[in-house]
Amino acid sequence: MSTSTFKQEHEIVIRNFQHGDMPALGELYNAIVAEGDPDSFWWIGDEHNWNNVYCAFEDGKMVAKGQVSIINTLPPGRPAHYKHSIYVNLKTLPQREYDYALLDKVYPYLYTTALELKATLPNDYGTHFCVGNDISDAANNQYFIQKGFHYLNSSFGMSRDLREPIPSFLLPESFQFSHWKMESSQEEQHYLDIEADIWPDAPLGTDKLAEYKNNPRWTAMVVREGDTIVGSLMAWQDGSGEDTDDGVIEDVFVREQWRNRGLAKYLLAQGLNYLKAHGLKTAHLEVLTTNKAALTLYESVGFFQTSEEVRHYIELK
């Protein structure tokens, strides 16, 4: 389908999300879910985040919503070519997905907000302004390409049926396994320091860790050798309360010196059993399409590919 120009018969009002907009937001969300793409829609978050959320109204109906969020903040000491990342999510009613005139009304608010967020980040590095969409979302992907965004990377969404048998793996005798709640800021920082060495160009950061920990049934699982953390993963229930049967596995890593000893498979089995023990039916994770070793690892414990997300970026000046 080619890009179309839609006639605007009524005024479009753009403003930040407010308390009274919740019913209209629900209608927009349900319309997108009815098209089978709920993961493409960012939820608004807590009220303190609403300054980063802009809604477009036509005749009192929410026809589009966009928001921006800092995803990765680089700590000092990284190579100068690494970048902070701020992501944007901009969605319309399904029948308006090619209404680029509508998107163009919302986008400048989001870009300006991204610049304001960039000003809060350490100025040792530049900042990428990124968008991620399912590879099948041709309309949204093409819109951002037309705005000058370039290909960044792609990731597979993978799922695993927790009702299927979960393999058992032995932990070598020199290692110890435990859950870790990271109850102090010192513990959190210790974890983040290790994690940043695994992904130096995209470390998790304090805010994202807090977001993860806020999920229902969140836990971190670690393997130690003595007092040294050598591998970890996180697991939680997707959504809130009992609204979903889906679990999430995130931030799976084994430090380089301790790889190829079966620790990753052991951690994954523990994570799957944890989610299953809490009554969940499916586990989900994401992996870069270029990470062949991780793909093979996840497939070996029963995960299969279910989706592909493609990401594009520009550099914020």
Image (spheres, rainbow, N blue to C red):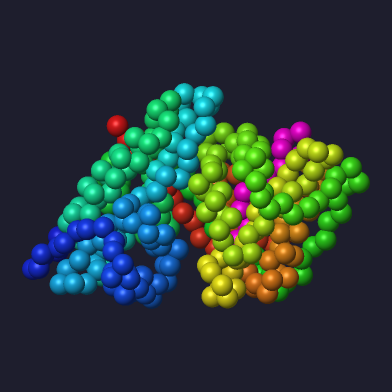
User: If the image is split into quadrants, where does the C terminus sit?
Assistant: top left
Task: Report the front residue among 96 and 88.
Answer: 88
Would residue 224 appear left or right of 13 to someone viewing this image?
right
Would residue 51 appear left or right of 247 to someone viewing this image?
left
Q: Position of residue 16 (x, y in %)?
A: 26, 58
Tell me if residue 55 can be seen.
yes
Please identify the quarter of the rendering in which residue 5 is found. bottom left
Rendered view: 180 above or below 9: above
Rendered view: 201 above or below 1: above
Q: Position of residue 247 (x, y in %)?
A: 61, 65
* Residue 256 located within the stretch drawn in magenta: yes
Tell me if residue 305 can be seen.
no
Please identify the quarter of the rendering in which residue 31 is found. bottom left
Residue furthest left in the image: 9
Q: How many marks?
A: 0
Task: Report the front residue among 168 and 64.
Answer: 64
Q: Tell me the residue at 65%/73% (across/down).
A: 281
Q: Position of residue 137 (x, y in %)?
A: 37, 59
Q: Tell me the residue at 16%/62% (across/down).
A: 13
User: If the image is split into quadrants, where does the N terminus sit?
Assistant: bottom left
Q: Tell me the residue at 56%/61% (across/down).
A: 215
Task: Report the front residue among 72 and 181.
Answer: 181
In the image, the segment drawn in magenta is 248-259
Please identify the quarter of the rendering in which residue 151 is found. top left
Task: Report the front residue among 191 and 295.
Answer: 191
Q: Position of residue 278 (x, y in %)?
A: 69, 71
Would residue 36 appear left or right of 64 to someone viewing this image?
right
Q: Tell me the residue at 33%/71% (across/down).
A: 22
* Residue 82 located within the stretch drawn in magenta: no
